[in-house]
């Protein structure tokens, strides 16, 4: 069977599985729809949380990003796992004890204010849609490369599947499909990693192979990589380029942002007890760590393999994956020195970085570019970082079924996260905006109907993002984490650990954190991108890390305003006392 | 009764605080601030600071959560026995 046929079979089989699960686990009440009836086993919830959490960005982009960033890439590894420690120790058990349906629910009741609840809904919707846009790009890439269908068709098929199980099954359907999706995605991630580890180092476990010597040589893989990267004009792979303060702030923003992401927090509302919520966070992190400790190994293998297989190769005999990705528009080659060979080194090969292709072909058969060459360096290729995980099995010349498996895994990662996000959006609309604010008279049955309608509308909007991707998708990822860190984390944390915090403090804190973080990111990413470098940044902190400062600002505002305004009513003290008990 | 719950809360805060100290040292300490210094030491093919930043910190995070689960289970049990 050809690789393409195999891919159809794998993707088709997994999609059939997800639909089967959706039919089996339909939601019959709002309790089912919002929190899966609160009877999900901690291990199952751990898997669902892992799938919910690990998005197209984790599965497709992260290893590629680290392959090019080297040690600087550690911010993603530590940031996106360390947040679970905060979640498990500071938030999840208490929010589970509180026992309601959504994150704005907690904020609305703890701060006895409809304004606080509405503000929380606005932040939640903004964070979640930002995140969904990235998932849709992942679905599009997988479909267009491996199934050779139009990206739009791919997005519509993906949306139809999510529609089916999210609208029918709500949280219940999503939970059990996410368990299946976790199994698919982790298998798809580990199989090629193990294969490549054996090929390159002879070690079965990638985490060990990563620190071993290369096959038939006494040289450690990482030492070779340091040497090769230095020879090509980069900073050595295992050394930092970014300043320590920036790395510190980015890691912190990602950690606190992770702990404050609504779609992750609600997963802990689905387990039966406080003890189960704690355990479940532990299982979730084990399942996540399985991928997150493999990813940096994959990155190092991929960087070595990539350089080995193309450096100084004539284009005419270059490997087929190189040309396949060039056709999709994610690789480009400009023969600056006109020797017909591919040279890779540091610096952007092209002016304006991203390639724009002409209809014409060059003398070697390559796609010619509109861009002018960037003559300040000798680098001749542009490689989109998102392709590394997908191209890795091809680069290492693994069998076709492994490539098909990776395609199915990438789709599982994107769809599971998209579904989780759609659910928190729809429940915050039907529960927080309608039932708790504007239409308190509706019955449970009507609320469930509105939840389904909201889910359907949200899927439609997400689909539009996929078909007409906003040009700034990549830039706004920093938004989701920065805003979650600067708005939700302090409000939730202080709500549990500091009884005296009142609504005035919480609202000012969230607003301050939101405005500061959003304007800093908008200023450097959209208004003045030309000066987006460390000379102009506040204390040398990049827009990716500014959420950390936004969070500190939130804490300072919340605490100081609270002291000068009147304390919260007695009922709130009782709520806090109550959630502190196991 | 009031005393019991207050003691429970204090013990809880102590557990959380000590575990967060470990969390901070493993990631921000070994993985970032002292990473370059630790790089002088080697662990097989890894420089130690690099290993902490890309592998070790994550293993420690997992251990911290399970320690927390275990310690809190013990504390909850103590509380419910005292209440009897």
Image: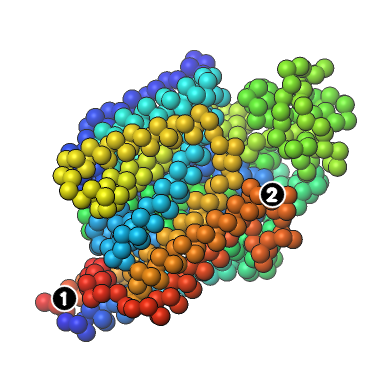
**Chain at numbered mark 1:** B
Q: Which mark is residue A364?
A: none
**Chain at numbered mark 2:** A
Q: Which residue shows up at 30% across the image and 74% down it? A: A568
User: Crowdedness of circle 2 by 10 Å Cα count: few (<14), some, many (20+)?
Assistant: few
Q: Which residue shows up at 64% across the image and 62% down it? A: A541
Q: Which residue shows up at 47% across the image and 72% down it? A: A557
A363 sits to left or right of A265: right
Residue A212 at x, y percent in the picture: 63, 49
Residue A248 at x, y percent in the picture: 60, 64
Query: Is residue A443 something that shows in the picture?
Result: yes
Q: Which residue is mark 2?
A: A529
Which residue occupies the extreme top position in the image?
Answer: A1
Residue A354 at x, y percent in the picture: 70, 35
Mark 1 lies on a secondary structure that is helix
Q: Which mark is residue B81?
A: 1
Query: Is residue A185 something that shows in the picture?
Result: no
Visual colour scheme? rainbow
Q: Is residue A384 above or below residue B61?
A: above
- Judge if badges 2 and 1 mark residues of a common chain: no
Q: Quadrant of residue B69?
A: bottom left
Question: What is the distance, in whole Å, between disc 2 and disc 1 at their CAs?
Answer: 61 Å
**Of discs 2 and 1, which sits in the foreground?**
2
Which residue occupies the extreme bottom position in the image?
Answer: B3
A477 sits to left or right of A120: right
A573 sits to left or right of A218: left
Residue B57 at x, y percent in the picture: 52, 61
User: Crowdedness of circle 1 by 10 Å Cα count: few (<14), some, many (20+)?
Assistant: few
- In front of the other: A88 or A566: A566
Q: Quadrant of residue A93?
A: bottom left
């Amino acid at each position: 069977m050809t690789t393409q046929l195999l891919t159809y079979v794998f993707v088709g089989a997994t999609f059939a599985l997800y639909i089967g699960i959706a039919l089996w686990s339909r939601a019959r009440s709002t309790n089912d729809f919002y929190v899966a009836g609160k009877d999900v086993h901690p291990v199952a919830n751990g898997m669902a949380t892992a799938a919910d959490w690990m998005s197209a960005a984790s599965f497709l982009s992260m290893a590629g990003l680290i392959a090019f960033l080297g040690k600087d890439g550690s911010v993603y590894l530590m940031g996106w796992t360390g947040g679970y420690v905060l979640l498990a120790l500071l938030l999840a058990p208490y929010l589970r004890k509180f026992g309601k349906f959504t994150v704005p629910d907690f904020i609305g009741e703890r701060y006895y204010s409809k304004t606080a609840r509405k503000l929380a809904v606005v932040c939640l919707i903004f964070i979640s849609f930002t995140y969904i846009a990235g998932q849709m790009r992942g679905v599009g890439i997988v479909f267009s490369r491996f199934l050779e269908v139009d990206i739009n068709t791919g997005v519509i098929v993906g949306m139809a599947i999510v529609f089916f199980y999210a609208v029918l099954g709500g949280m219940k359907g999503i939970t059990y499909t996410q368990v299946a999706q976790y199994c698919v995605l982790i298998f798809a991630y580990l199989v090629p990693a193990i294969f490549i580890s054996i090929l390159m180092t002879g070690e079965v476990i990638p985490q060990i192979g990563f620190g071993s010597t290369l096959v038939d040589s006494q040289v450690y893989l990482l030492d070779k990589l340091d040497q090769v990267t230095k020879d090509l004009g980069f900073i050595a792979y295992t050394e930092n380029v970014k300043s320590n303060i920036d790395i510190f702030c980015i890691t912190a923003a990602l950690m606190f942002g992770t702990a404050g992401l609504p779609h992750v927090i609600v997963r802990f509302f689905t387990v039966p007890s406080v003890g189960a919520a704690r355990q479940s966070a532990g299982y979730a992190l084990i399942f996540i760590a399985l991928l997150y400790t493999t990813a940096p190994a994959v990155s190092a293998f991929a960087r070595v393999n990539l350089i080995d297989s193309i450096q100084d190769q004539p284009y005419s005999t270059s490997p087929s994956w190189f040309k396949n990705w060039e056709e999709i528009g994610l690789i480009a080659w400009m023969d600056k020195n006109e020797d017909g060979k591919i040279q890779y080194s540091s610096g952007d090969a092209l002016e304006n970085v991203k390639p724009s292709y002409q209809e014409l072909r060059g003398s070697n058969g390559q796609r010619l570019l509109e861009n002018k060459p960037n003559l300040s360096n000798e680098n001749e290729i542009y490689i989109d970082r998102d392709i590394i995980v997908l191209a890795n099995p091809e680069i290492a010349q693994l069998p076709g079924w492994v490539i098909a498996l990776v395609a199915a895994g990438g789709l599982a990662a994107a769809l599971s996260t998209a579904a989780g996000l759609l659910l928190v959006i729809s429940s915050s609309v039907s529960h927080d905006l309608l039932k708790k604010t504007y239409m308190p008279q509706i019955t449970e049955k009507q609320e469930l109907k509105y939840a389904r309608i909201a889910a359907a509308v949200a899927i439609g909007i997400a689909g539009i993002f996929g078909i007409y991707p906003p040009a700034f998708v990549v830039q706004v990822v920093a938004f989701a984490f920065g805003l979650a860190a600067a708005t939700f984390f302090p409000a939730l944390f202080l709500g549990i650990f500091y009884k005296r915090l009142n609504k005035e403090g919480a609202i000012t804190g969230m607003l301050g954190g939101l405005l500061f973080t959003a304007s800093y990111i908008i200023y450097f990413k959209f208004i003045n991108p030309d000066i987006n470098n460390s000379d102009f940044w506040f204390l040398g902190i990049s827009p990716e890390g500014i959420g950390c400062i936004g969070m500190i600002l939130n804490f300072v505002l919340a605490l100081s305003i609270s002291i000068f305004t009147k304390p919260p009513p007695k009922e709130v003290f009782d709520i806090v006392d109550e959630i502190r008990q196991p | 009764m009031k005393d019991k719950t207050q003691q429970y809360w204090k013990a809880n805060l102590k557990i959380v605080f000590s575990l967060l100290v470990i969390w901070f040292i493993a990631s921000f300490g070994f993985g970032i601030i002292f990473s370059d210094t630790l790089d002088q030491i080697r662990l097989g093919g890894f420089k130690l600071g690099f290993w902490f930043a890309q592998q070790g910190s994550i293993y420690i995070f997992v251990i911290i959560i399970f320690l927390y689960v275990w310690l809190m289970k013990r504390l909850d049990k103590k509380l419910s026995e005292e209440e009897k």
